[in-house]
């Protein structure tokens, strides 16, 4: 393609780099009857927040539903570092509140001022320890600063018009706790690469989905009853 000489060479290189990055970005395929906002959320997480290796798990039909809520869609993504993890979760929560009026509960996210205070306190403890001749611990101690996992639980978002099923609706005389408010729950699990490999949520929930599918198939086969004999069988 012809080169636009009116643009300085360094800006042309940056533009090419951005185009290459946009071409390599991939978002997961949308499930059947996706919530209207789901694609926008995936694009923001991948493009704007810069998280990688997105995985989408459709848990809407699990019955009993997960503890995170009924009609659940889980998104798993990887950050490049702990700093990137906190920045991505913070900006994502602010974006949802500002643009869509959604409140995201980011469990594991430290506020901007809170992180600075904790780091100052840690540095002060290290200085005091060095002054008294103490050795700096070699192992990684959980000091409340380091984290490799942030779970962003969104408010309920609008469901697809054809997605009307609610787990437990077909149970007569239901007794217990159940959320009957319409909509879809979305949770975004953000990890560092090491923490994601250690936790391995994909294997856990894919196993749950396979078990649920087997149980549904067994229930359908039981409802069909025994196979009726045909004329060939009688002969």
Image (cartoon, rainbow, N blue to C red):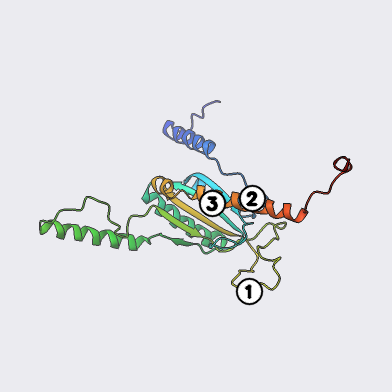
The one nearer the camera, 78 or 209, is: 209
In percent of width and height, residue 52 lies at 48, 44
Q: Disc 1 designates what residue?
A: 175
Residue 74 has which mark?
A: none
Above or below, 46 against 180 in this view is above
The residue lying at 46 percent from left, 48 percent from top is 200
Q: How crowded is mark 2: few (under 14 residues within 10 Å), some or many (20 or more)?
A: few
Measured Cα–Cα span from mark 1 to mark 2 = 26 Å
Measured Cα–Cα span from mark 2 to mark 3 = 14 Å
Measured Cα–Cα span from mark 1 to mark 3 = 27 Å
Where on the picture, by quarter, is residue 147?
Answer: bottom left
The residue lying at 68 percent from left, 52 percent from top is 218
Secondary element under disc 3, as helix, strand or loop, is: helix
- Comes first in the chain, label 1 or label 3: 1
Mark 1 or 2, closer to the camera? 2
Above or below, 105 against 36 in this view is below
- Quarter the N terminus occupies: top right
In percent of width and height, residue 28 lies at 57, 44
Q: Disc 3 designates what residue?
A: 205
Give the residue furthest to the top.
Answer: 2
The one nearer the camera, 201 or 89, is: 201
The residue lying at 72 percent from left, 56 percent from top is 162
Do the residues under discs 2 and 3 have CB atoms within 8 angstroms? no
Q: Is residue 91 left or right of residue 208?
A: left
Do the residues under discs 1 and 2 have CB atoms within 8 angstroms? no
Give the residue furthest to the front.
Answer: 235
In percent of width and height, residue 149 lies at 42, 54
Q: How crowded is mark 1: few (under 14 residues within 10 Å), some or many (20 or more)?
A: few
């Amino acid at each position: 393609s012809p080169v636009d000489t009116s643009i300085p060479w360094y800006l042309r290189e940056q533009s090419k780099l951005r185009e290459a990055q946009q071409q390599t970005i991939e978002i997961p395929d949308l499930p059947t009857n996706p919530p209207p906002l789901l694609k926008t959320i995936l694009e923001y997480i991948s493009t704007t927040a810069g998280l990688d290796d997105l995985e989408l798990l459709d848990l809407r039909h699990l019955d009993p539903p997960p503890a995170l809520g009924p009609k659940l869609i889980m998104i798993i993504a990887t950050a490049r570092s702990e700093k990137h993890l906190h920045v991505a979760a913070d900006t994502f929560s602010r974006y949802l509140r500002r643009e869509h009026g959604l409140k995201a509960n980011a469990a594991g996210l430290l506020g901007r001022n809170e992180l600075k205070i904790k780091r100052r306190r840690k540095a002060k403890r290290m200085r005091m320890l060095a002054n008294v001749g103490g050795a700096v611990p070699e192992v990684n101690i959980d000091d409340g600063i380091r984290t490799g996992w942030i779970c962003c639980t969104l408010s309920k978002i609008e469901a697809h018009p054809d997605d009307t099923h609610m787990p437990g609706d077909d149970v007569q005389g239901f007794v217990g706790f159940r959320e009957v408010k319409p909509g879809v729950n979305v949770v975004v699990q953000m990890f560092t690469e090491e923490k994601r490999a250690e936790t391995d949520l994909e294997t856990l929930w894919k196993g749950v989905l396979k078990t649920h599918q087997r149980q549904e198939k067994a229930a359908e086969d039981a409802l069909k009853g025994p196979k009726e004999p045909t004329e060939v069988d009688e002969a």
